Amino acid sequence: MDTSPITSWEGAEAFYTFFDGGALFWFWLAVVCCIIPIVVAYRAEKRAEERR
Amino acid sequence: MYGERADVDPNRKITEEEPMNPEELQSAISMTTTINLEVYYYWCTAIMILIHAGFMMYEMGASRVKHTLASGTKNVLAFAFMIPTFWMFGWWIYLAMPGGFIPDFEAGAGGVPWSASMGPNLADNATGVFWGAFTLFACTTASIMSGSVIERIRLSAFLILAVVLGSVVWILSAAWGWHPDGWMVTKWGYHDFGASGVVHIISGFFALGVLIHLGPRIGRFNADGSANIIRGHSLPMTMVGLMVIVVGFFGFLGGCLFYGGTEQWTNIYGMPTTLSTICFNTLMGIAGGIIGCYTITRDPFWMMSGALCGVISVAAGMDMYYPAFTFVLAFAGGLIGPMSAKLLEKFGIDDAVGAVSVHGTCGIVGLLGVGIFAGGYPPFSDAIPAPTFGGQFMGMLVMVALGFIPGYLLGGLFKVLGVLRSSDAVQETGLDLEIENAAYPESIQTDPELIQKS
């Protein structure tokens, strides 16, 4: 899959993948990846309490 | 421009017949300067990770065996959560909010996560390393709170508190008191070179706000209000952890300097200083604090915490202080830290590692010290007034409020929702129950026969 935002290194500046489109999708996916573990931790705490 | 890549042909060969012309030489010097800056902050960031590693050892050692892994897990996850969240909104807050609570969207444009600067960019060698250093400052704030709440806070609640402290509150305080255009700097001449206020007061008082709602560990206080000492399972681990933090402070305080390339080092406000100055005063501050704390407590735990008391008490003005004065002020910080912890204990606050006193109280000493002993140093530009006692005092009040209020409100909200504190039953079994693992499955006892043979 071609996701390069540049076609040459000549005069290149920002060159990260998805710079020219799609960055927001990955941004929000990263946000979700931060929220899920908090839910996972909360559920583990609940389980520990039920066990006691 | 600073941090921008100079236009140099990397394949250009310098020969005797064809030496560099002045433009090429200037360009090569500019590129070298830019890369020096990049390298310096890159390694400052790496060294600062030792602060987090040290805090983790310190907290695990200060925990009882049954809570050890929960304390370690909390610390590692705080580190991991701080990095993406600081990238998502922390750096933007720093750039956009030096004027107060109302963001300047134009100034913050370079800090939004999808901007050209917030990723690989051949025209910007600076943003990544500065973002990295500030991210590690954020990790430090989370570590500071982390120690005070061990053995009873829920991991999920702690992680949200850590993100709010590290990726919102601390960086807002940095925008106000560390940014050259920060309103406290331009209005009051607020001077806080090594972050006595923007990192330490903020984290110490945020922790205090949370602790009020979190309550003490089971058995910490008796019915008549008298306190019991709860000893951690490994004081040696705690002591080594604090020594590791001391190493990390060289990255932390070195990262508070700015390297202008063709001119002298400056502090974050543009006032000239040197790396040598910081070396003198970091070491003298650490030593003064250790000796001060030892003198008043003769307790190994506090003796090592004294290193932090000392360096935090002198951090705000260590770019200007005379080393002998630094030592004495740090010594005083080493006396004040444990006394403040005793006072908190009288109020029924269970701060497991003394973070509120070490960071909050000694941070106040640090800020006021500049006002009392180093007022009137000439500012870098006419737009910034000289530091004064009044400015430092007002700055201290702002830092205390900015740290305490969010911690108190969020801690209170979590308490109402019933998600702040682990149940008594889980605490008695050990918070490692939530981790579903044991720190020392084969126990840490040594076979008596082995001891006899050794």
Image (cartoon, coloured by chain):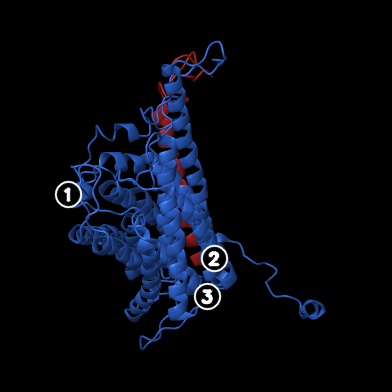
Chain colours: A red, B blue
For this orientation, the residue located farthest to the bottom is B224
Residue situated furthest front in the rendering: B16
Q: CA distance from mark 2 to mark 1?
A: 43 Å
| Residue position marked by numbered label 3 in the rendering | B300
Q: Amino acid at mark 2?
A: Met
Residue in the foreground of this view, choosing between B219 and B180: B180
Element under label 1? helix
Q: Chain of mark 1?
A: B
- Residue at the far right: name it: B453
The residue at the point 31 percent across, 52 percent down is B169
Which amino acid, mark 1?
Lys
- Cα distance, mark 3 to mark 1? 43 Å
x and y percent of residue B312 in the render? 38, 62
Quadrant of res B330: bottom left
| Residue shown at 48% from the left, 29% from the top | B32
Give me the residue at 58% from left, 61% from top: B436
Q: Earlier in the sequence, mark 2 or mark 1?
A: 2
Label drawn at residue B187? 1
Residue B60 numbered mark, or none: 2
Q: Is disc 2 in the same subunit as disc 3?
A: yes
| Residue B47 image label | none
